[in-house]
Image (cartoon, helix red, strand yellow):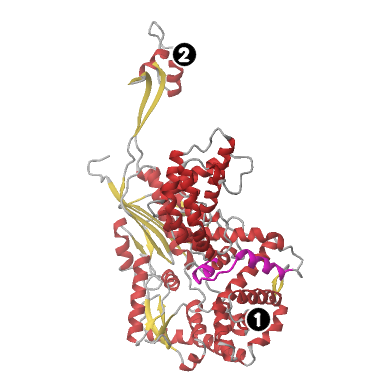
Amino acid sequence: MAADTPLTRDFLFEIGTEELPPQWVLPLAQALQQGVVQGLDKAQIAHGTAQCFATPRRLAVLISDVATQQPDQHQQRRGPALRAAFDAEGKPTKAAQGFAQSCGVNVEQLDRMETDKGAWLVYRQTQQGQAAEILIPNIVTQAVDGLPIPKRMRWGAGEATFSRPVRWLLVLFGDQPIPLRLFDLDADTVSYCHRFHHPDPITIPCAADYITLLHEPGVVIADFAERRARIHQQVEQVAAAAGGKAVVTDALLDEVTALTEWPVAILGHFEERFLQVPAEALITTMQYHQRYFPVVDTSGQLMPCFITISNLRSQNPEQVRIGNERVIRPRFSDAEFFWNQDRARPLAVQIERLETVIFQQKLGTLRDKSTRVQALAVDMAQQLNAPVELARRAAELAKCDLLTDMVQEFPELQGVMGSHYARHDGESAEVAQALEEQYHPAFAGDTLPQTLTGQILAVAERLDTLVGIFAIGQAPTGNRDPFALRRAALGVNRILIECRLPLDCESLLQKATIGYTHQSVDAESIISEVFDFIFERLRAYYQEREVDGDLFAAVLANRPTQPLDFDRRLQAVSAFRELPEAADLIAANKRIRNILRKITGPLAVEPDTAMLREPAEQTLLTRMIQITPGVIAQLEQADYATALSQLATLRDPVDQFFDQVMVMADDITVRNNRLALLAQLDSVFNQVADLSRLR
């Protein structure tokens, strides 16, 4: 290597494509960066920081300070001990000769190694590291092959496949190109910039110049995060200038960022008459169909304007504005038409039409599901002393908006439009709100139903689906969960716990199966399976909240059937474990369990007080008798924290018992009596949870 050759260089790799699907722009760029970095690390090529770039037309990775050479590889291989390698005359044995031959050298070329366990023959070799430019093509190829592309396509006459047709490749190691052929293309030092502002190719002389040259003269902001931040800033500025505030979601911001290379925010307007349509319908149209940012006033009311992101610096932005306004108008006109048409007839008219829509082939129609959910919702309302008629009516109307024109055109608005139509028809405000709330929570961290009727309807709807889908043998397997049952089970747990609903899951599942008696499915046989599935999702619920697994296992061992009760127990056990007495009591509980586990025969229900000879065992029983009535009363009121704090006062009597009493006495009668005492203590201790499972 020449003296003036740098020891490190920046490395740049870019794939130029036709416009990529926006949802895959950033993930593919991140995966490409990860693949190249892992390849360099595996080859032991030192490097600095890595950065990926992602636009609709390019995926690129730039890595600073990449070593130009692998380090030399030092290998050492130990052979036979010297005493076995040479005979009495010092001549090599077959063992030494065989080892040397396997290393490709003579015995004389082997070294010797002294250790505290003796001396050994050893083969040492230094393999010179390869140049990075020789290794990089294979590293890049493997990174590209490993990209998580869900659906590949072919183009032209070649056999290459990718998410979209690949049009150019750029590879630079410092200022040196590296030969590479992928996608039937040879890599070059040329990139293509903004499709309209700079359609001609641009030569990148050095990897470090990539970002600068793409920006100017290329009119491309290659960094995804920088482009995203610029869009957000522009949108907020434009909205503020219009006297409002932009409605910005992360999903829309990411999508618009993935669709642009040089974003420019432009304010558009629409007729105020469209504001008579529910805001959710207009916002859905703007966000999901047009990728516009809605604007609201200081009170949160939708304003008759929107913000679109153009992918160019137009010389006539007014025409861009007019064009987007022209596009949005027919969309809003459709929404207006559907809104007026749907309100021309009451929502309840759709009840009979639910009979024409199949919920699931083996589980009947939406009308069948509605009937089942009604029965379950009424039962839940009765248990909670909630207005039964509200629960029944909400369940009856729950799926009616699925047959409205608006929801058939905009499925995202199910529940929302049902709520609007119910209010228009004069239904109870709580029923109307419940129609929207039945779909909450829709995702992790989503809001929960606020009304009791909405909570009842949301739980009933999910339990019916869980029972039905399990009954037809379509339970989730591996990553497959086409009916989103895991999300449904988690939703049930969240509502019952966070909304403080004292409902028994096992009992509700039994009630839910009654609705399937007229279907050709055996729902009763899967109650236990569905129950276990729901409580397994409860494990995930607590894992997200960083609750220790042993706490969950301790409560689960007692199999409480109410999620709310489960939560109360878990919180109480968590608090108990922080008490100074807890560690000794947990250890004693484990000791008791280990002793009782070895007993095969039956034990007395209660110990015989007359046979308690030692003061320590008498004290323990006396103290147990003193606190047990209070503990039982606290358990009946689900005051688990107080019950456990009472049990914590047994630490000293328990410690003295194990210090002073021989449980496994020679006298079998005495032994069994002491075992009965321990069994009673174990029963009292583990009313809340199996404390022996705590660490």
- The residue under the point 53% across, 44% down is 593
- The residue under the point 29% across, 60% down is 209
Total numbered labels placed on residues in the image: 2
Q: Residue extending furthest front?
A: 610
Asked whether the residues under the numbered discs 2 and 1 touch, taking CB atoms below 8 Å apart as contact, a structural biologist would say no
Q: Could you tell me residue 306's position as x and y percent?
A: 42, 84
For label 1, the SS is: helix
Q: Could you tell me residue 208's position as x and y percent?
A: 29, 57
Marks 2 and 1: which is nearer the front? 1
What's the CA distance linking mark 2 and mark 1? 90 Å
Image quadrant where residue 43 sits: top left
Q: Could you tell me residue 624's position as x and y percent?
A: 49, 52
The type of residue carrying mark 1 is: Glu
- The residue under the point 46% across, 45% down is 588
Q: Is residue 626 above or below residue 389?
A: above
Residue 176 is covered by the magenta coloring: no
Residue carrying label 2:
94
For label 2, the SS is: helix
> Which label number is shown at residue 396?
1
Q: Is residue 10 left or right of residue 543?
A: left
Q: Residues within 10 Å of mark 2 (few under 14, many from 20)?
A: few
> Is residue 569 among the parts visible in the rendering?
yes
Counting residues from the N terminus, which is met first, the one under dot 2 or under dot 1? Answer: 2
> Which label number is shown at residue 274?
none
> Is residue 137 among the parts visible in the rendering?
no
Image quadrant where residue 190 sits: bottom left
Please state which of residues 409 and 567 is positioned toward the viewer in this rendering. 567
Quarter placement of the N terminus: top left
Please state which of residues 175 and 389 is positioned toward the viewer in this rendering. 389
Q: Is residue 528 left or right of residue 295?
A: right
The type of residue carrying mark 2 is: Lys
The magenta stretch is: 493-516
